Image (tube, helix red, strand yellow):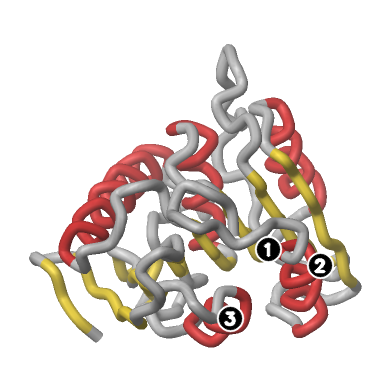
């Protein structure tokens, strides 16, 4: 674990200089190292940055808060997205990595904040792998144009997932479609846990995209 400033706790695994960095965002109660093995399996030559969530809620690390009634705190979600974007820029500069948008892999709470940030802020990532995400804004953020045109987004869902209702997953998928992203979904009979089946599905999906010669292409 390393620290940058007062509220950026991260882990870093170097990679090849001409490969896009991959930002790893854990689920509720996780930490910055949780997705390192998944990141290394999917992007073995890329620099990997695991970023710890900024808050503690009931003893669990998260990227944004719930309300007292159990819903999502819309104000804190926006604050968390600003923090995430600022932290990402600061880390890329600190680690002497390209300032171009990185790839993101997020799980659950980490996938939720990455997805909502993309729908609000446009192509802040040049590709996304979102494990068990859901729409956390109601309504889902909409734009007058298609700012995510051409951005590849892969999303997974478990049919037995007790945390992510099917309608909220579908609403998120539709939000990406409406903004022009290249969307692919993966469904399994699992619950909310990450499975080898979905990681293999993500790997097969990635095989469709060629590794770039520089940081501007797709991996």
Which residue is tagged 3?
38
SS at mark 1 in the image = loop
Quadrant where the C terminus is found in the figure: bottom right
Name which residue lies at 73% across and 38% down.
171
Earlier-in-chain disc, 1 versus 3: 3
32 or 101, which is in the foreground?
101
Tell me if label 2 and label 3 are in contact, CB under 8 Å. no
Q: Which mark is residue 132?
A: 1
User: Taking 81 as reference, is 65 above or below it?
Assistant: below
The quadrant where residue 39 appears: bottom right
Image spot of residue 100 (x, y percent): 36, 47
Cα gap from disc 2 to disc 3, whole angstroms: 18 Å
Q: In the shown orientation, is residue 187 left or right of residue 123?
A: right
Tell me if label 1 and label 2 are in contact, CB under 8 Å. yes
Which residue is tagged 2?
158
SS at mark 3 in the image = helix
SS at mark 2 in the image = strand
């Amino acid at each position: 674990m390393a620290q940058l400033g007062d509220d950026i706790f991260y882990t870093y695994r170097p990679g090849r200089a001409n490969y896009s960095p991959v930002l790893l965002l854990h689920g509720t109660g996780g930490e910055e190292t949780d997705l390192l093995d998944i990141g290394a399996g999917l992007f073995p030559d890329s620099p990997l940055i695991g970023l710890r969530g900024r808050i503690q809620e009931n003893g669990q690390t998260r990227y944004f808060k719930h309300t007292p009634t159990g819903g999502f705190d819309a104000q804190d979600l926006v604050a968390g997205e600003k923090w995430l974007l600022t932290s990402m820029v600061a880390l890329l500069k600190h680690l002497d990595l390209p300032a171009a948008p990185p790839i993101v892999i997020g799980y659950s709470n980490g996938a939720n904040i990455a997805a909502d940030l993309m729908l609000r802020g446009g192509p802040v990532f040049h590709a996304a792998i979102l494990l068990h995400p859901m729409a956390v804004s109601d309504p889902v953020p909409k734009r007058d144009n298609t700012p995510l045109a051409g951005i590849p987004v892969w999303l997974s869902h478990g049919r037995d997932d007790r945390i992510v209702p099917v309608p909220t997953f579908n609403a998120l998928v539709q939000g990406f479609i409406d903004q022009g992203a290249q969307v692919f979904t993966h469904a399994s009979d699992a619950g909310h846990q990450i499975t080898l089946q979905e990681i293999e599905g993500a790997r097969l999906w990635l095989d469709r995209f060629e590794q770039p010669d520089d940081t501007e292409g797709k991996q």
